[in-house]
Image: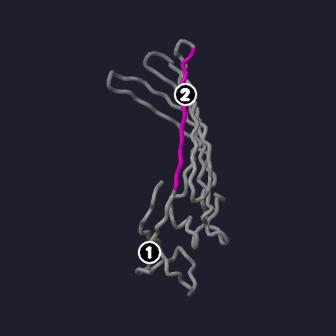
Amino acid sequence: MAHLNMKAQIPESFFNLSNENTTKYEPVGNILQADYDETFIYDGLYAQDEWSFWDAIFKANIGLRYEHINYTGERLLEPRFSLLYHLDDLTNLKLAYGYYYQFPNDLFRIDREYGNPKLKAKKSIHHVFGVERQLTDDISLRTEAYYNILSRLPVRDPVLKFDNKG
């Protein structure tokens, strides 16, 4: 459980405020300042296993992560998989795939008054290809290429303030 007590600041121009200004946000120059006192309960669990096969030429790693946060009520499963191929004694090739989520961490976006408390976690599906080469006993060189599919990104919405349309 995490208890969050912080002061947050955001430019006043970000909001389309009427004359009925809330006391939660205090104008400080052209900045609105807010005091937050919220309790967030975050649960997370991760399990993984690794197998070697074909005389340890291949190594597979399979994992599953579970996350939950009380503020949005989301429960998420994130499968992950990687495969390592020992090309020779000095070189490895790696493929990886996985789902990754990130809960909203900008309090203004999930604020009950100015944001959307039902804003979902951002989603990213990672695809990775890598090559690692052992140059000396102490030095290795690794290069990786990534392809990520991003979704559920928060964008401004005229009705909901923010929504996962991006």
Q: Residue drawn 67% across and 71% down? A: 159
In the drawing, does residue 111 fall left or right of residue 11? right
Residue linked to disc 1? 33
Q: Residue furthest top?
A: 55
Check disc 2: other Cα within 10 Å, few if <14, some if 14-19, many if 20+: few
In magenta segment, residue 52: yes
Q: Residue drawn 34% across and 27% down? A: 139
Amino acid found under the numbered disc labelled 2: Asp
Q: CA distance from mark 2 to mark 1?
A: 47 Å
In the drawing, does residue 107 fall left or right of residue 134? right
Q: What element does badge 2 sit on?
A: strand
Q: Is residue 100 above or below residue 71?
A: above
Q: Position of residue 46 (x, y in %)?
A: 53, 38
Which image quadrant: the C terminus? bottom right
Magenta part, dominant SS: strand
Q: Position of residue 91 (x, y in %)?
A: 46, 21
Q: Which residues are magenta?
A: 41-53
Q: Colour mode? A: one colour
Where residue 20 sits, quadrant-wise, is: bottom right
Q: Residue furthest bottom?
A: 19
Q: Position of residue 88 (x, y in %)?
A: 48, 16
Closer to the camera in the image, 32 or 73: 73
Q: Position of residue 133 (x, y in %)?
A: 43, 24
Q: Residue drawn 55% across and 35% down? A: 128
In magenta segment, residue 65: no
Would you say the residues marked 2 and 1 are in contact, meaning their CB atoms lie under 8 Å apart?
no
Q: Residue drawn 46% across and 56% down? A: 2
Which disc number belongs to residue 49? 2
